[in-house]
Structure formats: structure tokens, C-alpha cells
Amino acid sequence: MAEVAALVGHPARANILCALLDGRALTATELAYAAGVSAQTTSGHLAKLRGARLVDVCKQGRHRYYRLTGAHVGQMLESIMAVALTGPPRFQPRSKADDLIRHARTCYDHFAGELGVGIADRLIARDCVVLGNEAGEVTDAGAAFLTRLGVDLSGARARRRVFCRPCVDWTERRPHIGGAVGAALANRCFELNWVERVRDSRALIITPAGHRGFMEAFDLSV
Amino acid sequence: MAEVAALVGHPARANILCALLDGRALTATELAYAAGVSAQTTSGHLAKLRGARLVDVCKQGRHRYYRLTGAHVGQMLESIMAVALTGPPRFQPRSKADDLIRHARTCYDHFAGELGVGIADRLIARDCVVLGNEAGEVTDAGAAFLTRLGVDLSGARARRRVFCRPCVDWTERRPHIGGAVGAALANRCFELNWVERVRDSRALIITPAGHRGFMEAFDLSV
DNA sequence: TGGATACTTCGGCCGTGGCCGAAGCATTTG
DNA sequence: CAAATGCTTCGGCCACGGCCGAAGTATCCA
């Protein structure tokens, strides 16, 4: 047991595992970037994670795709995060980049930060979405609203992943909307050019069109 | 997050946390024995665990009693165990103590092992309890049955914690009943003197009265 | 076929963190 | 008040494990 915990207990490996948390499979190079260490160091970490069956690998050409071995690993990571969040507030140097990332960012493939939590709040207030502790659901009114916005809900339903789930935001410490719905909504916002990615970061910039759009659609000023 | 995992990821600290897993409060010296290191080393570990709010301490005379800060820490430990057990099979010397703990033990504050899983199985078979993946519920028939047994269900409902939830058993690899209901049921069994704690262990001994009681109440021979 | 890309293995350097002996407080007991 | 007990702090030793540079496989592409 200590071995498993020790594997998660190193920043580089924790970053790798978090990057895999949404179930996608990523290549070793992508994970090296996420971990912030060199490719050969990452390779060593991945070998250890594989040895403990925390991640699986599948070869495709010259790429190797890594993924979590199963939901139980994801649940473990979530439970560790939950404990970490109840811990003592940590010292966090404020910086320009920090403010950006607190303001709006992606959480794997959906929105987080003030933007993500704000959207979730509005959708909940309008009875478009119901979020429980472990799961969530889109109401009929919510489905109509999102469809009107151009979000591909039927595509989202067809995917094998969880349709709608709450995802605790690590800056706001409140839930935002994850799962296939969260991803589909984020996709649509990218299409509409409401947000743009910041290079080499998970941070997002909200375009002028985005400011108008989020205000019109969600009555949300960001 | 990596910090929390790193704390759990050392054998000495993992032992300390496991020793606390049944919810009892233990003194620093007892924990030093459980961890297998000297008192001063243990003191250092405990200071770190306390710093991360994984354990709480309360002074009583010249003793200091340590306990887990809450159920969320216990759940995290269980989920790590669950992952550790799905990993590559490890060499495990079988011992008398091992058999005991596999047979019947406490899991935080409810029953686990063959006993815990057996009880869960019978309650499910009789439609007294329904267990999902993340949550569970007690049926009306179940409430009547447990009340007849003397379990304090209304007290359990009044508490702020999750009422009924499945808890994956790390030896049986199947769910047993946790949450407030699991705790209340365990309490009642202690009251009835059906089980007794084994010193310095989470293992339980089923008394002769317990053998009769579990057979009569649950049709369960343990 | 040869070079580029993706990934792993090897080897050596270095720092963090664990460990215990000794000493220092705090509390209880005689 | 002194001795014993429970626990923590301090200091120094040591080793495990992380990190990267360099070199070695495997695969793709022109």
C-alpha cells in the first residue's frame, strides 16, 4: 500500500496521473510535458507506474499511449485530492500567470476556474443542470438551452464516458461541470471563438466575442 | 496532492495510518510500536501527518492521543488499498494474525472481512439494503429488520455523514456496508457482545453468543 | 536506404529525507 | 522535590531515489 501511495507521492508522477485522470490516453512525450521533466525521466516514472499496474500502455506505431488501468485508480486519485483540499491552505505566490489560470482554464477538456464555476452556477440556478455529489444530470430545459447554443448533446450522449459529472475546482473549491457535457460545451465555445488557448498553459483568454456571448447566453460577466 | 500521497507513501507512516483506520485514538508510543520505528522517529512522522491535517491530536495528561481527522482520510486509505490489491500479486506470508483479520475486522467503524461481506450479502438477498456503485439505501423492510435487531437507525439518520454507502472490502474484494448504518449496526453488535476487539489489531473475535446471533438474525455461519 | 522521430536504458552526480543517539520539556508518581 | 514516564527537538550520518546527458532500439517517412 505504501508503494502505491509513494508512486503518487512524487510531483512528476502525480502530474502524469492527473493528466490521465479523464480517461484519455496520452503519449509519453505529452506526459513528459505535463510532468515538467525530461523524456527519459518520464520514461522511468512510467515504467514504475506500469510496474504497479496504475497505468496501461498500448503501442501504436512509434507512439506509446498511456492510460489509467481503470476507474479504481481514478477514484483513488480523486479521494487523495479530496483530502488534499481539506488540508491547510497553502502558500501560493500570486503572479500574472496565476491570475490568468485562476480566471479561466481547461480542466482536461472542459472549463474550470472562475469561468467554469460561473457557468455551472448559472446553469444550476436556471434548473438546466442538477449536480449531486458524485454525478449530475442535464434537465430537459437544460438540453433545450444547450442545443439552442449549438452544443452537440447527442454526440456527447453517444460517447462511452460519463455524461455529466461535477468536478471540484481546485481554485474555487466548488464544482464545475465535467464529463461529456462539459467537454461538448467547451468545444462549442472554442468553435464560437469565445475563448482562446494560451500557449504552453491550460489558461484561457476570453475574447471580446466571448465577453458578449457569455453575458448574453449565461448572464455572466467574466 | 503529491504531498498527501507522499505522506502515505512511507511504510512507517502507512503503518501508523492503518493502525488508526478503525477510528480509535492511539498514543504516540503505541503508534511507534505499530510503525516499527523508534519513538523520536514516530514523533517526526506524526508531526508531518498533523501538519497536513491527516491526523488530529488531543492531550490527556502525559499521553497524546492521535486519531484520523475524519472519515474522508479513512476513505482515501481504503481506496489506496483497493488499488494496491489490484496490482501485481505480492508475496504475502500467511499467518495466524492474517487469517484472523481476513475473517472479521473493523473498517474504520463498521464491519469488514468475511463477516462484513457476509452480512451485506444477506441484507441484500433479503431486500433489506440496496447497494449501488457509489451509494446505497436501506429499504423499508430493512429499516424494520434493523430496528427489530436494536440498531439505532434514527440516530444514524440524524448524523451528518453519509447514511449508507458501499465500501469495497480489500480482502474479499466485494462491498460491505459502510456509512452511518454500518457504524450503527457494528455498535449494536458490540452492545450485544457478539464480537470483541483483539488487542493491538483491527481483528475481531466472534463470541459464542455472536455465532448464535449472526445465525439467527442473518442465517450466517461465520 | 538514411535520416528523423519516439521512446527507453545506462551511468554518474547530487540532494532530500529517514534514521537513531542524546538531550530537553512536560506531567505524573513516590 | 526527585525520579520516572511520555513525548518532542536537535544534530549528524547515510542511503535511496530523482535527475539529466549520452547512447541504444524501434518505427516512420521521403
Image (tube, coloured by chain):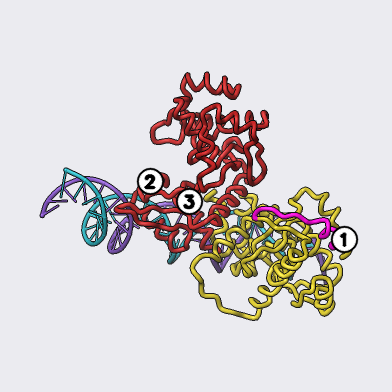
Chain colours: A red, B yellow, C purple, D cyan
Q: Does any portion of residue B200 appear in the rendered image? A: no
Identify residue for label 3.
Answer: A17
Mark 3 is on which residue type?
Leu
The mark that comes first in sequence, 2 or 3, is 3
Chain of the residue that carries numbered disc 2 in the rendered image: A
Determine if the magenta segment contains residue B38.
no
Distance from disc 1 to disc 2, alpha carbons, whole Å, reads 56 Å
Chain of the residue that carries numbered disc 1 in the rendered image: B
Q: Quadrant of residue B96?
A: bottom right
Identify residue for label 2.
Answer: A30
A14 in relation to A48, above or below: above
D10 in relation to A103, above or below: below
Residue in the foreground of this view, choosing between B9 and A47: A47
Which one is in front in this view, the residue at disc 1 or the one at disc 2?
1
**Callouts 1 and 2 in the same chain:** no
Which one is in front in this view, the residue at disc 1 or the one at disc 3?
1
Residue in the foreground of this view, choosing between B18 and C6: C6
Q: Does any portion of residue A73 appear in the rendered image? A: yes
Residue in the foreground of this view, choosing between B59 and B191: B191
- What residue is rendered at 51% in x and 44% in y? A158
Mark 1 is on which residue type?
Thr
**Callouts 2 and 3 in the same chain:** yes
| Picture disc at residue B147 | 1
Residue B146, image x and y in percent?
A: 84, 62
- The magenta-colored residue range is B133-147
